[in-house]
Image (cartoon, rainbow, N blue to C red):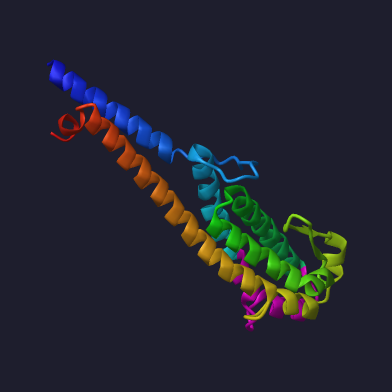
Amino acid sequence: MAANKGKSSSRKRLTNSLLSTNKYSNRYNTQTNKTTGTNAAATYMNMKENAGKLQSAASKLLDTGDNSIYAKAEESGDTSQITSQVKDFVNQYNSTVRNLKSAGGRVDTSYYNQMTSYASMYRNALEASGVTRNSDGTLSVNENALKKASVEQLKQTWGGSSSFAAKAGQVATNVQYNAVTSMNSMINNSYSSLLRNFGASGGFFNFWS
């Protein structure tokens, strides 16, 4: 009876610890240095989600075919679909950049630098469509300037394989993969550490029996 009680207690402790490791907060961590523990887990979870949304926003802007938002704007003279998509892209871009800066790891910093360097490279084109680069690498939207941008200006900056959206979207794919890899590594390391601790206390074999 006592043995079963001890085994049950070990299971509960391990399960609770693993759940704690996997319980990611939806709130953004504002820490600017490299994060650790649950803060890092929350940051990487948000990074994965935001990078995925950035890819989705980019794909909608990259389509320049006959049924694209650009073709519809050229036909109707209404650029509201494009401007709405640009604002969504900027929001997801900013969230991803902040996540990368917050995580602060070597790979994270490399992707942060890639993202922000593209924003610098396309500075003039971005400004022509009402989007400016901030000192921290994020972007700001001037809605009046964005609304005044022509379909051609918007298409040049945001549409096609050589656009800013394409470059940032490509980096976002790598960012998402790295976020998933980092989360898995954290979980595996935590799991291994927990098992070592259980083994050291004599509870390891009881737990698996």
Q: What residue is shown at x 59% (from left), y 62% (from top)?
A: 110
Using residue 154 as the reference point, say whether residue 166 is left or right of it.
left
Q: Is residue 42 above or below residue 129?
A: above
Q: What residue is shown at x 35% (from left), y 30% (from top)?
A: 16
Span shown in magenta: 57-79
Q: Nearer the viewer, residue 45 or 149?
A: 45
> Which image quadrant: the N terminus?
top left
Q: What residue is shown at x 63% (from left), y 60% (from top)?
A: 112
**Residue at the extreme top:** 2
> Which image quadrant: the C terminus?
top left
User: Splitting the image into 4 quarters, where does residue 192 fall?
Assistant: top left
Picture coordinates of residue 203, whole percent (x, y): 20, 28
Q: Is residue 2 above or below residue 44?
A: above
User: Splitting the image into 4 quarters, where does residue 139 fall?
Assistant: bottom right
Picture coordinates of residue 188, whole percent (x, y): 35, 46
Picture coordinates of residue 40, whole percent (x, y): 52, 43
Q: Label the magenta part by its dominant secondary structure.
A: helix
Using residue 181 as the reference point, say whether residue 209 is left or right of it.
left
Magenta span includes 68: yes
Q: Is residue 4 above or below residue 64?
A: above
Picture coordinates of residue 111, whole percent (x, y): 59, 62
Q: What residue is shown at x 79% (from left), y 58% (from top)?
A: 134
Using residue 2 as the reference point, say whether residue 94 is left or right of it.
right
User: Splitting the image into 4 quarters, where does residue 82 fall?
Assistant: bottom right
**Residue at the extreme bottom:** 66
Q: How many marks?
A: 0
Magenta span includes 100: no
